[in-house]
Structures are given as C-alpha cells and as structure tokens.
Amino acid sequence: MEILNGLESVLVPLAFFAAIVLSLFFYYRSRHQERMAMIEKGIELKNAKSGRPLQALKIGVLSIGIAFGIFFGYLMTEYTIINEVASYFTMILLFGGISLVLNHFISLKFTNPRN
C-alpha cells in the first residue's frame, strides 16, 4: 500500500500537467488547421479575426480590484471584529465588482473616442 501512496503522489501532478499540455496542444492545432482552411478558401485572416481587443485590460483591472479586495479584507480582519472569512469574501467581491464597472467605463472610452 505504501507503494501506491508514493506512486499516487507522483502520478497525480504528472497527469494534471499532461492534461494542461494536451489541452494547449489540441487548441493550437485546431486553430492552425482552421487558419489553413481559411487561407485555402481565400479568406483574409485580418477580416476573420474577431477577438476581444480589451480582454487584457479587463483581466488587469479585475486583478487589481481583487488585490485591493484582499488588502482591505486584511485591514478589516485586523482592525474590526468582523469574521475573517466574511471580510475577505465581501471585500474581494466588492472590489472585483467595482473594478469590472470601472473596466466598462474605460472600455467605452476606447470604443467611442468622441465622448
């Protein structure tokens, strides 16, 4: 039984890593095949590319909001009598939500430069 426990502690992280690598491999392979098919049909890749150009901005602003939430959750646990779990949970959600609303207004400025 000790051999199985030792083997399990090696195989689980290895299987997790293999799953991530295989997922990335098949994602990029199918993306490459799709692009090659588009090139063969004569479709321009610039026109077919429909990504989210402000996705990195959203992730960055949300990360900053979550960091502020963790910080203010820590301050609430240290200087008030509020429960630790409740203070962290509420502050992370509050600042995460505020950051997403802020991201919305920032992205409106980028998409509508006239306003």
Image (tube, rainbow, N blue to C red):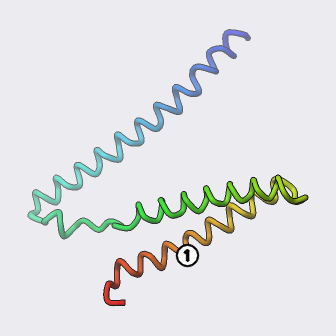
Q: Nearer the viewer, residue 106 or 15?
A: 106
The residue identified by callout 1 is 101
Q: Is residue 56 left or right of residue 102?
A: left
Q: Is residue 66 left or right of residue 112?
A: right
Q: Quadrant location of residue 88?
A: bottom right
Q: Nearer the viewer, residue 85 or 41?
A: 85
Residue located 16% across and 60% down the image? 38
- Quadrant assignment for the N terminus: top right
* Image location of residue 96, percent across then percent down: 61, 65
- Quadrant assignment for the C terminus: bottom left
80 over 110 or under it: above or below: above
Identified by mark 1, the residue type is Val
* Image location of residue 102, percent across then percent down: 53, 74
Residue located 34% across and 85% down the image? 112
**Residue ranking furthest to the front:** 79
Q: Quick one: SS at disc 1? A: helix
Q: Is residue 81 left or right of residue 98?
A: right
Residue located 48% across and 60% down the image? 59
